[in-house]
Every structure is written in structure tokens, then in C-alpha cells.
Image (cartoon, coloured by chain):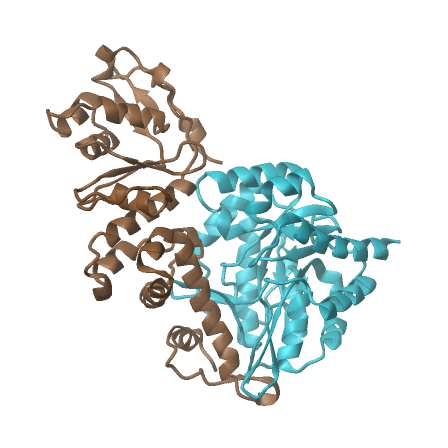
Chain colours: A cyan, B brown
Amino acid sequence: MTGKPASADVALPGRALTRLPAGVGVGFKPQHFSDILEAPGPVEWVEIHAENYMGAGGRPLAQLRALAERFPVSLHGVGLSIGGEGRLDADHLARLRRLAGWLDPASFSEHLAWSSHEGAYLNDLLPLPYTDATLDRVASHIDEVQEALGRRMLLENPSSYLAFAESTWSETDFLAELAHRTGCGLLLDVNNVFVSATNLGTDPRAYIAAFPLGLVGEIHLGGHAAEADETGAALLIDSHAAPVADPVWALYGEVIAAAGPRPTLIEWDSDVPAWPGLRAEAARAAAVLVGARA
Amino acid sequence: MTGQGAFRRALLDPAAAVPAGLVGPGGGPAARRFAVYRNNVAVGLTEALEAAFPILRRIVGDDFFRAMAGVFLRAHPPQSPCLADYGAAMPEFLAGFPPVAHLGYLPDVARLENALRRAYHAADAAPLAPGDLPAPADLAAARVTLAPAVCVIRSAAPLFGIWRFNTRADAPMPGTGPEDVLVTRPGFDPHVDLLPPGGAAFVEALDRGATLAAAAAAQGPAQDPAPTIALLLARGAITALHRADGGPALHDSAEARRNP
């Protein structure tokens, strides 16, 4: 795809990396609806999974409208399959465009991953080989998404359990090149950095040092679970079902020290605690952000 | 090169070998690592089915449901990332799944649970209040618009009794005769009601655009349509009434349905 003009040259409305405030947000869960409106504590914004709000009406959309009146909303897709070998699902992109159209979210983000193949949706963020061919395909899909939505998107680094022998790019160079070609920003999931580095035997600090922090429009923090593979090597699972682990907090502190305050999300999707538990986790991230402003 | 087709086949087939070209740290084995993705797919879709079919799960038991979900998700992976739609094929699957052949009512339970989920996500619609109805003389020739959440499930089984027995602690045992049910959504929570005899034919006829008089005829001359009309009104299931003379619709809430 040499000679292709970088789509960053194409006029995209909303050229800023994000309209989210550089404070802390939480992944919205319906059971927290009343609590988050009445006692948000340090929480300044919320993130929703786009696929949960694509129905025609009912309680989900009513709650979302009420949230959006109060908080900036980050729209986070989990099913677009941007890394898929086939074409993007036109129906799904149309649903996303409709949702983003009326919601006008402060940010839209998706994953460097694939999840659908020939019409079957596999409900997981599946890994990609980092090759020139993958790069061309993903860049073309990001162009298509940004053009359909009329906005700049953020692309999230994955959590990896394995690698592809055929990969020729490092993940950080791959993400930087995608951002360069498409004009997209990046979503840095610090837990994913720690999980992938542990699982692949690499250094998470070297990853952060190589990451284009200037392009980071949002940070994710979530919990993981610890297992082991057949050789006894550590195998961390990106579960989003636990508090953020201490080494991930340490890494996050270093990222914020280097990059300055960035919108930071606490994501907790399974075994979700009652609101005070999630709010306490958010307060811990807020303290790091406040410290960086001082 | 490790293609996504091979990756997908191995994900959904626990007996398949790990695709070539996948490695752990230092080029080490990737089997246990690939199993994480395999497990994520199976567990995630099983949990989606558990959330979609709580009554089926209660009837067949947790272990049986999980095993059955494993068969279903491999035969019918989702066709959309919107998992609220997942499971549309469950009634047909159950009808052809030999281990539950003796539970002939299960497909109807699945149809009911699919209707409840569709109702939950259906477009909002402002209902017609009982006081909005014109005089009975004008009513017979009128047609109605039903709310998007409305669904009739006909069953040869005592479907209402089965639903009630599995959702309420103090419910009586189900009866034995056939029961048709009406799914509606007054407010945000879907509601299940038993339809009187002939009620299903009456509501289906209204949904096809029949006048109230023609719908009443469709349910059989021996049946009184009044209880079903009262039920539809009580559940906010009628959103507009169209006069026979083509005059302006009464309380047409089409605006409210165009959402958002």
C-alpha cells in the first residue's frame, strides 16, 4: 500500500484526540445507574460498550440518555472486528454510526483484534499477526470506520496469550504506524501491557518506553487473574473481574508521570462490586491524576 | 501463515489441534495459551445464553444447560455482535435435539424467552389510555396499532403455567391444557399474561390490520373480545386507534416510536 496518502490528511471533524476530561471514568453497569448519578465521587465520565445499546428502545437507551445528560460518554466498541480478514460488517458499522450519531460521544474506541469470521461472531478479542499484510488491512478498516463515523477513533492495544511466528513488527511499532497512516489515536490499556508482557516474556517498561504516548487519548485499567501454562510459565488472564493489580498501578503511575494526566477508565465487567467498591478503585486512579497535575 | 478460518475452526472444536504458527514465549508451546481463547469463546457465549434463557436453564438444570449450550453455540454461533439477539435459533434447535425430545414444551419456552428479550429492547411507544377510546359504535370499524413490544405465543402446552411456576416462588403447578400468552412491555419491564381462549387469534388479526369487528370474528363467535381488549389497554399494548373513515388517528404515538 505504498504511495497511499495518509488519511490523516483527510478532513475529519473532531481532530482532537478526545473530548473526554483528563480525569477518571468507569465502565457503566446498569446496576450502578442510581448510585452513579447520586454519588459519583471522583468519577467524571463513563464508558459504555456500544453493542449493549443498539436496541430500538427500552431501559438501556433510557439509562444511556440520562447518563449522557450528566456525564461525557466514551463509546467503546467490542464487536467491530477491525482486524478481521474479511470486510467490515456493514450492518454493524451502520448500527454504530446511528448510535454515535444521536449520542455524540466524547470518544469512540475499538480494539486491535478480530472477533468475527465469515458471518460468525466469536465474542472474544482474538489476536493478530503483526505483518505488513495485517497492517494494510487494519489501516484500511480504520479509514472506513473513521469515514463512516466522521470522527477520529482510538485503537486499543490487546492483551495477548500467545504470539505469531510470522510477526515482523513489534506491537508498539505496529500501533504507531497505524496511527501514522490513519490519523487515529491510541487507547493504552496498562493492564493489557502488563498481561501481554508477562505472558510473552517481555518487559512492560520497555513497551511503555516504545509506545507513542503523545497519541494516547485514553487509558484503561482493569484486573487480571493468574494461571500458568503447561511449562509452568505465568499465564495472566485479562478477566476484568478483580481489582487492578499492584504492579499495574505502579506501571500506570509511571505512564502518567511520563505522559501527563490522561482520561483513565476503571473497567470491571465480571463479579462487579457494589458501587462503593468501584468508586474506591476510581478514587485511587483519580489520586494519581491529581498528583500529576500538582 | 495462520489464517482466521483455521483459528476459528480450532476455537470451536476442542478436539482440533492448535493452529500452526502460534507460539508461547521464546517460541515455546502455545496449547495452554490457545485454550484461553477457546475457553473465552465457549464461556462467553454460554453466559450469554444463560442470561437469555433463565427459565430453560431452570427447567433442565445448570449442568445440562451448559452442556446443551456447548452444542448450540458450535452449531449456531452468533451472527451479530449484538448478543441481545443471540439465541433466535434456540426453539428450532430444541425441537431437533434428541436429549430433550421428551420435553415437547421446551421450544415454546424458548420462544417466550426470545419474545421477552425482544420486548425489553423494543422501541418505546406511548400507549393509548382506556379513557381515549371512542364510543362502542365507532370502535367496531376501527383498526389499531400495537406497541412494538407486543408478541403472541401460541402453545399446545400450558405455557403460562410453566412460565409462572418457574418465575414465582409460590406459583401453583402448571395445568395440562394448551395456553397462549401475550408479551407486552408496560414501562420498561416485559410482562407475561395468559390470553383467554380465542385471544391469540384476536390479537394476531389486529396486528395484521383487521378492524376490531373483523378481529372479533376471527377469534370465533362464541368468544367475547372485551377481556382481551381490556388486557391490551391495561398493558399499554395499543398505541394508536385509526378511524374507519380514514380520519385522523387517535393518539398516534408514531413520533414516540421513532427512537431515538
Picture coordinates of residue B188, whole percent (x, y): 45, 36
Residue A85 appears in the figure:
yes
Above or below, A112 against A26 in this view is: below
Picture coordinates of residue A244, whole percent (x, y): 68, 63
Residue at image location 55% in from the left, 49% down from the top: A149
Above or below, B217 against A230 in this view is: above
Q: Is residue A186 left or right of residue B60?
A: right
Above or below, B241 against A163 in this view is: above
Picture coordinates of residue B72, whole percent (x, y): 32, 64
Q: Is residue B93 left or right of residue A150?
A: left
Residue at image location 49% in from the left, 36% down from the top: B260
Residue A170 appears in the figure:
no
Q: Is residue B254 left or right of residue A219?
A: left
Above or below, B238 against A54 in this view is: above
Picture coordinates of residue A126, whole percent (x, y): 51, 70
Residue at image location 36% in from the left, 15% down from the top: B132
Q: Is residue B124 left or right of residue A196?
A: left
User: Could you say which is closer to the camera, residue A175 or residue A230?
Assistant: A230
Residue B129 figure quarter: top left
User: Could you say which is closer to the camera, residue A208 or residue B90?
Assistant: B90
